[in-house]
Amino acid sequence: MNRKTWTTNPLLIGTLLLALGVPCILFADDTKADDKDKKDAPCVPKPLHANEGQHDMSPAARLLPDPPGAELFKADPCYTQPYNAEAELDVYRRRNMIDRPRPPVELGIRLYDRGAYTPRPTWFGVKDPMMPAFMMYGDLRLAGAYNDNGVPIAPSGKTDQSRVAARLNLDMDIQLTPTERIHAFTKPLDRNGSFTRYEVDGAVKDKAVDNFDFNIDTLFFEGDVGAMLQGWTGKNNRIDLPIALGRVPIVTQNGVWIEDAIDGGAFSITAKNSPKLDISNMDFTFFAGLDNVTTAAEPGDKARVFGMAGFADLLRGYLEYGYGYLDADVSGHSYHNVTAAFSKRYRGRVANSVRVIANFGQEGVGGVKTADGVLLLVENSLVPRRHFGFDVSTFNPLNFVPYFNLFAGFKSPQSLARGADSGGVLRNTGLAFESDGVTGYPTLDATAHEAYGGALGVEYLFGLDRQIVVEAATVQHRGDSLLGSEHSLSARYQRPFTKVWIVRLDAMKGWRQGRNDILGLRLELRRKF
């Protein structure tokens, strides 16, 4: 498919036809199932015990007159089975310890603790008692892969590489009180996005590469001003004002708009509502980053960012929005960034999210603008009602998720801030746009610059203990883009095989017009601790 001109695009046409046909099948009226659901058997109460109406009472107790009528109380619950006192007691008496993962380091209050606590220290005030604890936890990922990114690698000029790589995510948490803590995170096996690995064969053969780096990736204090004031003043708390200061990780809209750790701080106004606007819950978060801000629109990490992000539950859906200003270190690269997203389930059958990111106000350098455009993301997943011939005793239609995601990028849209290992802004659009962050697994173009396309796939979660995904995706470039069309087929399977170990397999094949094709095969073992 590496020819320069195409007259037709069979994969894209087939994808669109399939996307139109699947909803028609799933939305077919299943009147028989509806009629069956409506014929619920009437509730027939069973006697509470053999001697209904005869009660043993304390002599000090007395029966009240007839209770008030239905105008004050709802009807009593209807119990369809006889009361079994022994079964009720067994809820507590037959409880057993469960085998669960435990952090390797636990000091003070443990993650899964039991028993009564001794009186806590009150260094921060009687009304903000201490709950001291220290925990270290995370996960270790070991991955073997064969990747062909289509780009010749010097000095051999080959495009493929097989390797084994490792990634360690290590969280360290110091809890001071139930609402205040100090948290740190580091990735000791990678440096600047390059992971410790062994190059097996391909462009580089039989070479070990160590990238040990114990630099702190995040280190911040997190707490609630209301709880702290309560401890300092001895008066009951009347406000909720969570804050974070330090190298703070910020993630909004599932990482689409912001996914970065910035040197600065944030505070939130939480749990507000507006009956007049039919908003049951809404939050506002204000943030500022004075250093270590990463964006593809600005070289280096010396930019500054200021903004706010919020959400609201309204119109039986979920609204997200935000505004940010990136003050670039390079003159002419500063820009404004706005976003909005609305998610809702329609008729209980279609879960839909529509997201928009827009950049404006950048002057550019030498007439070139790096953040000047609009990105539209549309995510759809279906809840099928038919069982597709499966035995309903082993098939849960809620775990069978067909999805169809679309995107359209105009000019050069950018996330407000995006860490180097966070992938492209299209990472959540489909498997074909998601790298693994360990082995350099190939992806389609995930920038959305002067491009449109999408991903059509099916995910099945079995009994929520396994996952299998099959997907087809496409990217169509337009305008002044020098890149041709891209298409791919991807698959994923993962499951835990113990309480702490997870195995995952990924495969993808990509065809790119005018450039070398890409291929990725990988096996990953993840140990959570």
Image (cartoon, rainbow, N blue to C red):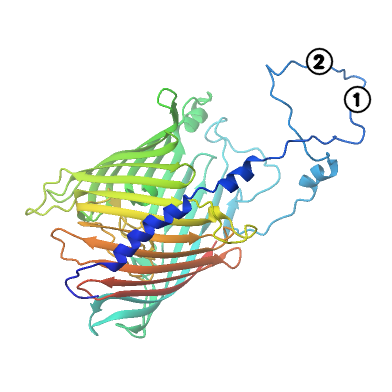
268, 107: nearer the viewer: 268
What mark, if any, has residue 359 been given in the picture? none
Q: Which residue is mark 1?
A: 57
Q: Residue at x 42, y 53 (%)?
A: 23
Residue 112 lies, with reference to residue 6, above or below; the image says: above
Helix, strand or loop at label 2? It is loop
Task: Give left or right: position of 326 versus 250.
Answer: left
Q: Which residue is mark 2?
A: 66
Q: Residue at x 63, y 51 (%)?
A: 112
In the image, farthest residue toward the left:
366
Helix, strand or loop at label 1? It is loop
Residue 414 lies, with reference to residue 83, above or below; the image says: below
Q: Residues within 10 Å of mark 1 (few under 14, many from 20)?
A: few
Residue 141 lies, in percent from the top left, at 47, 68
Residue 243 lies, in percent from the top left, at 41, 38
In the image, farthest residue toward the top:
65
* Residue 241 appears in view: no
505, 378: nearer the viewer: 378
Task: Give left or right: position of 460 versus 517.
Answer: right
- Which quadrant is home to the C terminus? bottom right
Task: Give left or right: position of 239 versus 67.
Answer: left
Residue 34 lies, in percent from the top left, at 58, 44
User: Type of residue at label 1?
Assistant: Met
Using the rendered view, name the quadrant where residue 488 is placed.
bottom left
Q: Nearer the viewer, mark 2 or mark 1?
A: 2
- Which quadrant is home to the N terminus? bottom left
Using the rendered view, name the quadrant where residue 212 is placed.
bottom left
Residue 283 lies, in percent from the top left, at 41, 34
User: Type of residue at label 2?
Assistant: Asp
